[in-house]
Image (tube, rainbow, N blue to C red):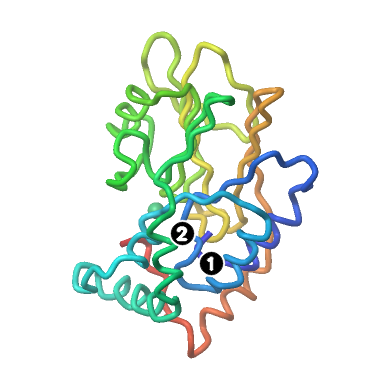
Amino acid sequence: MHANLEAFVAVLKDIPPKDVVSAFAWGHSWVRGEPFRVHRLVASNKIQSLKGNHDEAAGLDLPLGIFNPIAGKAMQWTRNALKREERDWLLNLPYQLSLPEHRMTLYHANGFEPEGWEYIHGKDDASLALTMRDQRTPLVFIGHTHFPAAYGMGPNGKPLDIFRSSFRLLDDTRYVINVGSIGQPRDGNPQACYVVYDTATKTIDFIRLDYPVAQAQEKLSRPSSPKCWPTDF
Ligand SMILES: [Fe+2]
C-alpha cells in the first residue's frame, strides 16, 4: 500500500469487519508516505503481512548505490524515518503465508522463488508458468506489479488470462490472482484496489474505491517528504 494512509483508510472502511475471517497485506506498507500510521492500522486490525521487496530494502543495510538515484533518495528517507527495531521487524516478515485449509498460498512477487522478486506481467510470462507448475495449492495470490490480474490453468496445462471483476473458481483449475495495489495502482485507474475471496462460495471480487488522492499527493509535496515516487527498485 506504499504507506498511503488515505487509500488504506478508505479500504478499511469499505470492508465490513464482521465478515472478515483473515486480512492480508502484500508488502510495501512502509516505504514513503506515512509508514507509522499505516503500520499502526495494520497492527490494530490484526492484518497479517508479507514482506515485499521495498520492505526488505528498507530493512537491510544495502548500499544506496545499487538503486537508481530517485529510488536511492526515497530509500534513504525511509531508512531515516524508521527505528532499527522497526527495520528488523520488516526483515522478519515472511516471504509467504500458507492456508492449507483453504488450499491457498500468498506471496509478494511469485511462487517459484518468492525471495527473488521476479515479476509476473502476463499470461505468457515465464514466471507465471513456473509459479503454476510449482505451486503447492490450487490458489495463489500475489501482488508486486500493482496491476490487478487473474490467471488460470485448467487440465490442458495452458495459462489463460481470465481477469474479470468478479468470478467463481472452478475445482479443476489452478489460479494465480494478482490483488493489485491499495496505495499506488499502476493500471491507469487511480482508485485503490483490493480483493475479497469468499471461501464459502469460492468467488473472487476485485473492489475499486475512490479515496482522497489530492490529500495523499499534498503530503508528498511537503518538505519532509522524499519528493519522489520511483516506479520500483
Ligand atoms: Fe514489490
Question: Which label is found at residue 3?
Answer: 1
CA gap, disc 1 to disc 2? 7 Å
Q: Earlier in the sequence, mark 1 or mark 2?
A: 1
Residue 5 lies, with reference to residue 19, above or below; the image says below
Residue 194 lies, with reference to residue 191, above or below; the image says above
192 or 9, which lies in front?
9
The residue tagged with tag 1: helix, strand or loop? loop
Q: Does the residue at mark 1 contact the one at mark 2 (Cβ under 8 Å)?
A: yes
What's the amino acid at mark 1? Answer: Ala
Count residues near mark 2 (Cα–Cα under 10 Å), then give few for <14, some for 14-19, many for 20+.
many
Count residues near mark 1 (Cα–Cα under 10 Å), then give few for <14, some for 14-19, many for 20+.
many
Question: Which label is found at residue 28?
Answer: 2
The answer to whether residue 172 is left or right of residue 214 is left
42 or 133, which lies in front?
42
Quadrant hosting residue 43: bottom right
* Residue appearing at x 53%, y 43% in the figure: 179
The residue sitting at the front extreme is 85
* Quadrant location of the C terminus in the rendered image: bottom left
Q: Any atom of ligand 1 within 8 Å of the CB at mark 2?
A: yes
The residue tagged with tag 2: helix, strand or loop? loop
The residue sitting at the bottom extreme is 223
What's the amino acid at mark 2? Answer: His
Count of all numbered marks drawn on residues in the image: 2
